[in-house]
Image (cartoon, rainbow, N blue to C red):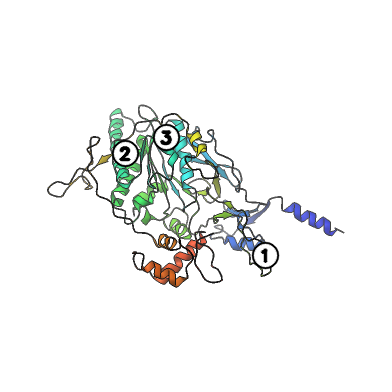
Amino acid sequence: MTSPASLAKAHVEEKKVMREYLLRTRPGGVKGVDHDALCDLLEIDDPSRVIFEQGRGREAVVRVFPVNPLATMRAITLEDLTIDEDGCIRIGSYYDSEPLRMRVHDPATGNAQRIIIFGTTGAGKSRALQAFLIACKRAGIVVHLADLKGGQSVPEAQGNVATHVTSLSDVMGLLRAAVAKAEARFHKYAKLGRSGFIINDPDPLEYIVIDEANRLLEKGSPFRAEAARLIKEIGRTGRSVGIGIVLAAQAGHLDELGGSDTLRAMLKEGEVILLRWSSQMMQALVADGLLPSGENLQPILKEIGRIRRIRRWDDRKDAGGTKVNSQGMCYHLTSHRPTSIARYFLVGSLHPHKGHDPAIRALYGSAPPPGEPLRLIFPPPKDGNGKGSDDPQEPGLEYAEGDEPELEALPAMPKTNAQRILAALEDGPLAEADLLEALDNDGGKDVKRGSIRTTISNLRREGELAPKDAYGLISLPQ
């Protein structure tokens, strides 16, 4: 007979190993798996330890790990960021240790890539972008960067890229110049009888990189239509002449990316990486065709290992404790494993610095960036008939340095309901009625109670607001 001590020891040993369940599903596989219900069935209180993955045909697998396999990641190395014979770099690892790779260049066709990185605030977009920028500099690839967070998103990139701009008007000058360069190469290669691009023969591979691209392409942006048109043109003409496009954005819906079906289709054929998302973004990705209909991705919580328990009245234990941030956890939607969870290697230091991150600066190196800066193209002043080169039919003109026209100050972008709520709570918690009153008086558009409640629920789900307390107050996380 087995003793209680032996049973207890066996139970402890079981917690140290990974359990695997192979499933035979109904024809067509399983769609819309309820991850919380699966964890409840397995009696697992930490949902990050349970991985469900659909295989080919009618096979699926459920793996239960002692701890989340992606909880800790090693630092990225220059070897990871060296482009291999397939034109790829290693940016991280899947949960089962298979390398997570991203294509930078296609040696078979000579094409530059079209890359987009989606994710909510704090999900790791900037660190992911840093990895790409470092890889480009080390490989001699010319980068023209627009950091539309005033240069704050990737500050270490300044001085390590050929062109660096931070304003909406300047990124438009950058896009016009990139399209002009792509068209010049197109005609030059046609005369040579060349159908593909060969790196450094005679031109280098170049990338236009736009961080916080949603600020440029979302509804209300003053340059939205022209920016979408120019990005599409770079995607069509540029990729075959060695000029690629990279977008990092918070938005996940077609309407937030210029409202263009062509733009969405173009990006869908490139490299699409999804970091931590909101429920609205997930619905939009399915609706826009970036995920198969009915497909579900395992949620990425803001903190790995967060356990939701009902706290007993006499339980005086601290409900907090150290949790692991999920920054960098992602899905590579256009890879061979679109629904397998992965994570970026650690890019830079774990803790913030008063200035530039020394670990990131070391990865860039001290050498000057490859390539020459693009001369931005601005439209000339309106003529007497009120017509100028900002009309879609006319090309932009290049101004000599110092002769650019003065641009009028751009109107302030309207804040979203989420931004207005977070701003109203900066001075402390508010009851719902007080929050509604604050929103009525903040100068923004009128909002309905139901819309505000939905936004509050989404913010709580994403960890941007504290959970609902006994007094019903709405507050920021402590």
Mark 1, secondary structure of its residue: loop
Q: Secondary structure at mark 2?
A: helix
Of callouts 1 and 2, the N-terminal one: 2
**Residue 118's spot in the image, x, y percent?**
45, 50
Mark 2 neighbour class, 10 Å CA radius: few under 14, some 14 to 19, many 20 or more: many
Which dot marks residue 316? 1
Q: Is residue 50 visible?
A: no
Frontmost of labels 1 and 3 is 1
Q: Check disc 1 and give the amino acid type.
A: Arg
* Of 230 and 153, the residue lying toward us: 153
| Location of residue 133 (image quadrant) | top left
Residue 243 is left or right of residue 285, and the answer is: left
Residue wearing tag 3: 160
Q: Write the residue at 28% across / 48% down.
A: 226
Q: Residue at x 20, y 42 (%)?
A: 380
Where is residue 29? Give x, y as percent: 56, 57
Kindly report the distance in space between the C-alpha atoms of the residues bearing marks 3 and 2: 19 Å
Badge 3 marks a residue whose secondary structure is loop
Q: Which amino acid type is marked by label 2?
A: Ala
Residue type highlighted by circle 3: Asn
Against 100, residue 285 (above or below) is: below
Residue 178 marker: 2
In the rendered structure, the answer to whether residue 327 lies left or right of residue 258 reads right
Residue 96 position within the rendered picture, expressed as x and y whole percent measured from the top left:
61, 46
